Image (cartoon, rainbow, N blue to C red):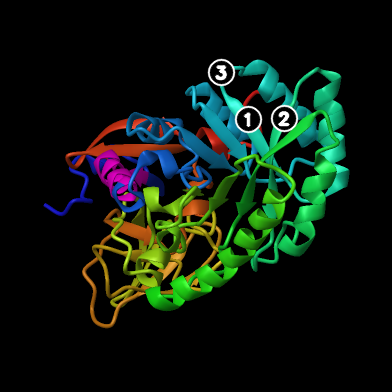
């Protein structure tokens, strides 16, 4: 029997998100082996958003995490994650929510990123008012051009932050998601060029401070290019589930699919065309078709999709019938996970549990 098949599938409605814990554990082990140690890892949990999956990382010896939302940070605190970096600058009400996390979960050390003095000052004033000091990472823009201060301006930001009582700069955060070359040698060269800017900034900071700063860098495509650097933490996220996009974009990485979506045939249009219940609301729709590839129907070609429907065409006569199940690998797993309230847990080809995708919510309690 293929690894993904579910013997008691009749009890699982479609569409559903399916998680295979044994393969999750294998991906975590592969990551630790590639990194050389769990101590240098700070995985991003925005992919999985599931407390049980993060607990598997904790059990494997990973103690530092990265997240994008307050809900993800709270999820991590609820499983007693020791160290949580909010890699999304908290503006507006998020600053107060971050403070409430710190107050409500004292066993977890929280930090966040900043890229300007206005936000740094607001955070400092807020935490200083409560006689607290928030750890912050300077968010560097080394080519992603999405957020962050450019390294040539970061030295001044570092110096100015030293005058703020309510925050303490403990590191530098650099997301290099723009480095996605399939060729590993080219990916490595581009990574080295980008990281040189971080090194130059560190050298500047060393002229005025003896503090050893933490360096966080490297998403799923780029982190292998950083594994020989000293004093660096790597923060991939997609590795834990993997997806069709990265499997084919970076074939040098050994991770395996550990999460799928299932869908059922709901209508047979003609001898070559069927309709399934995997619509926009069930698989990430930001990419052009195909947005999903089916393990048990590799010759299926998606020809149209709407909110609740996905129409597939086959090169020849098909024998699919209403109710038949297809097992799909999303092109992009991260936003696909966020479409589901729960994940169906499968071990040894049987449904054994359901895990709440708790951090898909904008708010858990805080």
Say whether residue 366 is visible: no
Q: Which residue is mark 2?
A: 134
Q: Residue at x 85, y 45 (%)?
A: 160
- Is mark 2 in CB contact (under 8 Å) with mark 3? no
The mark found on residue 110 in the picture is 1
Splitting the image into 4 quarters, where does residue 293 fall?
Answer: bottom left
**Label 3 crowd bin: few (<14), some (14–19), many (20+), radius 10 Å:** some
Q: Residue at x 32, y 34 (%)?
A: 60
Secondary structure that dominates the magenta span: helix
Q: CA distance from mark 1 to mark 2?
A: 7 Å
Question: Residue 295: percent from the left, percent from the top?
Answer: 26, 63
Q: Residue at x 86, y 46 (%)?
A: 117
Q: Nearer the viewer, mark 2 or mark 3?
A: 2
Left/right of residue 304 with respect to residue 11 in the rendered view: right
Left/right of residue 314 with respect to residue 96 in the rendered view: left
Question: Residue 171: percent from the left, percent from the top?
Answer: 63, 44
- Is mark 1 in CB contact (under 8 Å) with mark 2? yes
In the picture shown, does residue 328 fall above or below 113? below
* Magenta-tinted stretch: 18-32
Image quadrant where one finds the C terminus: top right
Q: CA distance from mark 2 to mark 3?
A: 14 Å
């Amino acid at each position: 029997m293929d690894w993904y098949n579910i013997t008691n599938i009749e009890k699982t409605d479609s569409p559903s998100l399916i998680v295979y814990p044994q393969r999750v554990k294998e991906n975590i082990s592969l990551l630790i082996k590639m990194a050389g140690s769990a101590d240098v890892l700070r995985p991003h949990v925005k992919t999985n958003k599931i407390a049980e999956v993060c607990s598997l990382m904790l059990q494997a010896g990973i103690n530092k995490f990265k997240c994008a939302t307050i809900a993800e940070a709270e999820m991590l605190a609820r499983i007693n994650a020791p160290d949580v970096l909010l890699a999304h600058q908290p503006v507006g009400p998020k600053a107060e929510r971050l403070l409430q996390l710190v107050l409500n979960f004292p066993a977890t050390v929280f930090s966040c990123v900043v890229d300007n003095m206005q936000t740094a000052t607001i955070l400092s004033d807020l935490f200083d008012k409560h006689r607290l000091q928030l750890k912050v990472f300077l968010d560097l823009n080394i080519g992603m051009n999405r957020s962050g201060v450019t390294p040539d301006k970061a030295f001044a930001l570092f110096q100015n932050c030293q005058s703020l009582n309510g925050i303490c700069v403990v590191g530098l955060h650099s997301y290099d998601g723009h480095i996605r070359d399939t060729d590993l040698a080219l990916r490595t060269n581009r990574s080295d060029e980008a990281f040189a800017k971080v090194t130059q900034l560190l050298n500047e900071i060393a002229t005025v401070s003896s503090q050893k700063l933490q360096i966080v860098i490297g998403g799923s495509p780029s982190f292998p290019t950083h594994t020989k650097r000293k004093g660096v933490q790597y923060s991939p996220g997609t590795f834990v589930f993997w997806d069709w996009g990265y499997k084919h974009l970076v074939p040098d990485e050994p991770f395996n699919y550990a999460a799928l979506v299932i869908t059922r045939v709901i209508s047979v249009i003609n001898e070559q065309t069927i309709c399934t219940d995997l619509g926009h609301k069930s698989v990430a729709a930001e990419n052009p078709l195909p947005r999903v590839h089916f393990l048990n129907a590799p010759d299926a070609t998606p020809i149209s999709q709407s909110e609740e429907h996905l129409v597939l065409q086959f090169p020849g006569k098909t024998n699919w019938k209403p109710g038949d199940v297809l097992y799909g690998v999303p092109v992009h797993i991260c936003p696909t996970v966020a479409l589901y309230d729960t994940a169906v847990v499968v071990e040894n080809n049987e449904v054994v549990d359901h895990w709440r995708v708790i951090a898909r919510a904008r708010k858990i309690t805080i």
